[in-house]
Amino acid sequence: MKIDDVIQTSLLYDFYGSLLTDRQREVMELYYGENLSLSEIAAEFSISRQGVHDALKNAGRALHEYEQKLGLVDKFQQSREAIGDIDERIEGLMEDVQKQEALVPAEVTAELQKIKDIIDKLEE
Amino acid sequence: MKIDDVIQTSLLYDFYGSLLTDRQREVMELYYGENLSLSEIAAEFSISRQGVHDALKNAGRALHEYEQKLGLVDKFQQSREAIGDIDERIEGLMEDVQKQEALVPAEVTAELQKIKDIIDKLEE
């Protein structure tokens, strides 16, 4: 599995994991979260290695189907990118303003800082 | 049904509607979207008024259960509020800057406008 696929699956899991079965969630936590091998997880649950493989595959498929229907991860990522863009621009403005302190009223600096705080909270 | 409940249900439907059955979706569209009465919808599908009532109730319950598990509408609303707050502050800054044009470099004004554009696109 490629690293991008792992990141994408983790993101899908963060969003839709609560819609999976308990067993699917447990297997995904051990595989993606704890980095256990298929054999280790099989031993943990006293099921076959193939059973673990199938559970992971079904869980992954279910997550992708939820995203196909809901598209919320895509929406979230677009929103994050836009907020990151705003964040960079606000930081740039704060630097510019700092260089030209005499020209810019203190209220502007204070207000930019407030906006920055809101963005930081959003990005938590 | 109170107006707040209708708004909340519509929002839940926007997010999770695609996870409902076709029939549940059709009934919700007619009831909330087209404002048809239970009797009118019953006639449309040749089912009982009680059947429409149950379909709406089950659909509403399913939507609330998705939100309880996923909490994405709540997350989305919080994010919208924060972005609305940033929007107001940027607009305030743009007004301040306009009043004191001589004091503020043109680049700052241009950059504020760019941020405003990104926010407007986010809020679409």
Image (cartoon, coloured by chain):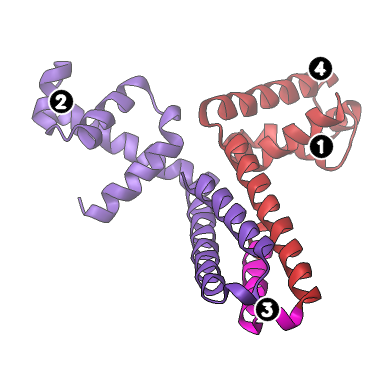
Chain colours: A purple, B red
Labels 3 and 2 in the same subunit = no
- Return the chain for callout 4: B
The residue sitting at 69% across, 50% down in the picture is B85
As displayed, is residue A19 above or below residue B26?
above
The foreground one among B123 and B106 is B106
Rendered view: A93 above or below A20: below
Residue at image mark 3: B104
Q: Residue furthest front?
A: A102
**Residue B76, x across and y down, in percent:** 60, 42
Sequence-wise, the earlier of marks 1 and 3 is 1
Residue named by callout 4: B50
Q: Amino acid under label 3? A: Val
Looking at marks 4 and 3 on the same chain, the residue that comes earlier in the sequence is marked by: 4
Q: Residues within 10 Å of mark 1 (few under 14, many from 20)?
A: some
- Spot occupied by residue A51 in the image (x, y as percentages of width and height): 19, 27
Of A104 and A14, which appears nearest the observer? Answer: A104
Residue A76 vertical position relative to residue B96 in the rendered view, above or below: above
In front: label 4 or label 1 = 1
